[in-house]
Amino acid sequence: MNTASVTLRLLDKADKEILKLPRAVKGALYDFQHKFKANPQATGLQLKQLKGDSRLWSARVNDDYRALLLRLADDDWLIVSVKHRKEVYENLDRLSYGINQVTGAIEYVDLQVVEESVLRRVSPSRPTAPAHPEQHVTPVQPQPLFAHFTDEQLTDLGVAEPLVPVVRSLTTEDQLLGLVEFAPQLTGEILLSLFDGKTYDEVLEQVTAPVAAAEPVDTEDFQAAAERPATMVTTTDEALREALEGEDFGRWKVFLHPAQSKLVERDYSGPARVGGGPGTGKTIVALHRVRHLVEQLPPGRNKPVLLTTYNKNLAADLRARLVELGGEELVSRVEISHVDQLALRVVREAEPGNAKQTIDDNQVLREWRAMLEELGETSWDGEFLHDEWTQVILGQAVASRTEYFRARRAGRGRNLTRAERADVWQLADKFAQRLERLGRQSWAQVAERAARLEMEREQRIQAVERQRDEANGLDNIHLQDGSAGWLRHRYRHIVVDEAQDLRPGHWKMLRAMVARDRNDIFLVGDTHQRIYNNQVTLGSLGVNIRGRSAKLTLSYRTTRQILGSALGVLEGESFDDLDGSQESLAGYRSVLSGGRPTLHPSPDWESERDAIAELVSEWNDIPLEQIAICVPTNAMAQETAVTLARSGLRAVEIGPDGPRGDEGVHIGTMYRFKGLEYQRMIIAGVTDGLVPRDAVLQMQRSDALRYRRELQRARSLLFVAATRSRDALAIFWHGKPSRFLDPLLDG
């Protein structure tokens, strides 16, 4: 055997089994894979073929544990399990492996482990005394969960064939979850979707079709199967170490779901969008898309790919994750910047003398209120004027009173008469002068100014290209010279994360920064998670995604129980898809299972904080950094931190740039938790008047449309907070609970 280039892979699901092994065994396995790749035939490894099987082999990890391996080819091996030596050589018929006829993926199942997991979930029957002693009662036999589906239908959907008899025996949800824990992932997705009420055709379309192999599957060609995206494996030392140590419960660095992989590698004729609920891997897809685009670039030292998102904290996280995905070599070809920083750089390049202080929306709103107070103006509230100025006047680049009279105000709620528009325009003009006098500018102003500058630059580029075409490909040196350099678009490709929170000005700027060509703009986002009031229709801004949109529906982070509760928060709301149509979370699902969210009422805020501290103290089996507490206001965050400190629990506040420290429970407002994830999450202060705010509730009579929009935004904030947790979610309130909790309380 040639041992110079031995490939050793680790099958998905095997790593989950390995995580439960003793630490010493994990270390021995890490050493084992080095030794095996150096020489599988080394005496100490005791590599041997299992009796009566042509592909399944065992090898020694340490004195007590053995690795089970599939031999894919002469020098290509796949670890499918690590077991105690006593469990390896007996009852070999229980070890089932094969190639899924639908996806072409390698699947491995220990039928004994699956059956034992199902049996553990059987509730002990309680004898019921008959109403009359002489009356004989025949016990009611439970109906099998999947009695309405044939074996052929199940396998055509992609259920692993060896598991069909076990599937037939399932009668309760607990038994189903016991099977899903050890079944191949696709089998779990299919069965849970059918259990949730999906029809055969719906599961075929939503679950099976996105991962089906593009070509006919040869169920005997294991080496080809190992190369398919559907076979989730890892080969690198670093990836194996992470799998062994379980450092990162989001394993995006190693595995892409086949449906994600297709989106990453697709050749798009123009801008494309990927949507999906929290934890479905949208950011993962964006990062892998960046790597895919960089791999297509010619050699060079420039940065023709832009990766951007809506704030500094998320941009820093994207950079760290991109480094882990592809190293500094990958990052060297990518510009990573949050979109406001990018806009500010464009403005400063064009206006080097601009020394204005840029202020955030909260500061802008305070300036509006201060101006109205100084003017004695009581007809308008500052929040309405701030939104009107940002969304309509700046958002549509309105430059005159006449233009404002013609401006579209769709979705703004309150209708304005001509006299009212004149009044608003006068106040907006005074406000702009006020900021100018103070030497300040808003981020919305920066975005619109950057958009105008980039659109003017694009027009010059197009003029040069027209002249070149007219001159049969020759450049006009004088035309180029006026631009202080050879004009070209800033980027070849742009990838946008959290797209739902960008302003109209941002989109106009980004559209002008990249040539209108194949694979120009790739964006990911979820309007159910929109936490800012930036509602846009991308088509009207030149970003035409129609026909190039896809949706991810499988959550890798949130359990079914937490997911169901979070979806209840959105009950009755409808959301747009960034292109004028409706967005839906239909088919959104998880194969993870855990406890239901717990609900904790308190009489007042002080006793609520004490109860929170008590629960955090009980969660002493995980690092404090994997626990987060989310509250409605900054003042409540500070008060909660003080209460925790009295109980000897360290807390770290989450600021605009992320956690302000390394050790302690993370505490912050709902806005701060976008893009973050934790093992356990507490949402506190979910009290009527705080979630949503009293100010929102008071809009119901004065401005019904604005009330509905703000109510939806408040729901989205709570939805984002509820879906940050992997394992446990606890919801606290004092006094009257928020109306958003009604579906949870009724359940």
Image (spheres, rainbow, N blue to C red):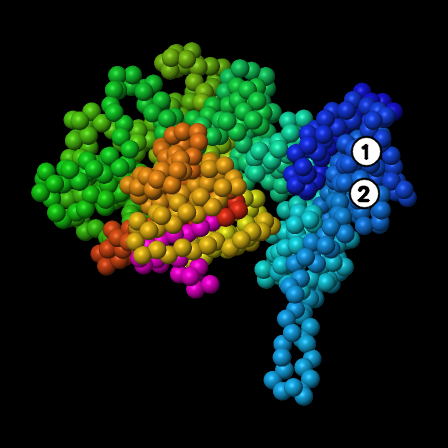
Q: Residue type at mark 2?
A: Lys
Place residue 58 in its image quadrant: top right
Q: Residue type at mark 1?
A: Ala
Residue hosting label 1:
59
Which portion, as a residue range, is magenta? 729-747
Q: Is residue 345 above or below residue 62?
A: above
In the image, what residue occupies the spot 25% across and 25% down? 357
Percent position of residue 707, x then y: 29, 54
Whether label 2 touches label 1, CB < 8 Å? no
In the image, what residue occupies the spot 75% across and 28% down? 32
Label 1 environment density (alpha carbons within 10 Å; few <14, some 14–19, many ≥20): many
Task: Give the side of residue 466 with respect to residue 696, left or right.
Answer: right
Q: Is residue 430 visible?
A: yes
Q: Is residue 336 above or below residue 152?
A: above
Q: Is residue 152 visible?
A: no
Q: Is residue 740 magenta?
A: yes
Nearer to the camera, 372 or 592: 592
Percent position of residue 554, x then y: 57, 47
Task: Give the side of residue 513 with respect to residue 77, left or right.
Answer: left
Percent position of residue 574, x then y: 42, 55
Percent position of residue 43, x then y: 86, 25
Label 2 environment density (alpha carbons within 10 Å; few <14, some 14–19, many ≥20): few
Describe the element under mark 2 as helix, strand or loop.
helix
Residue hosting label 2:
86
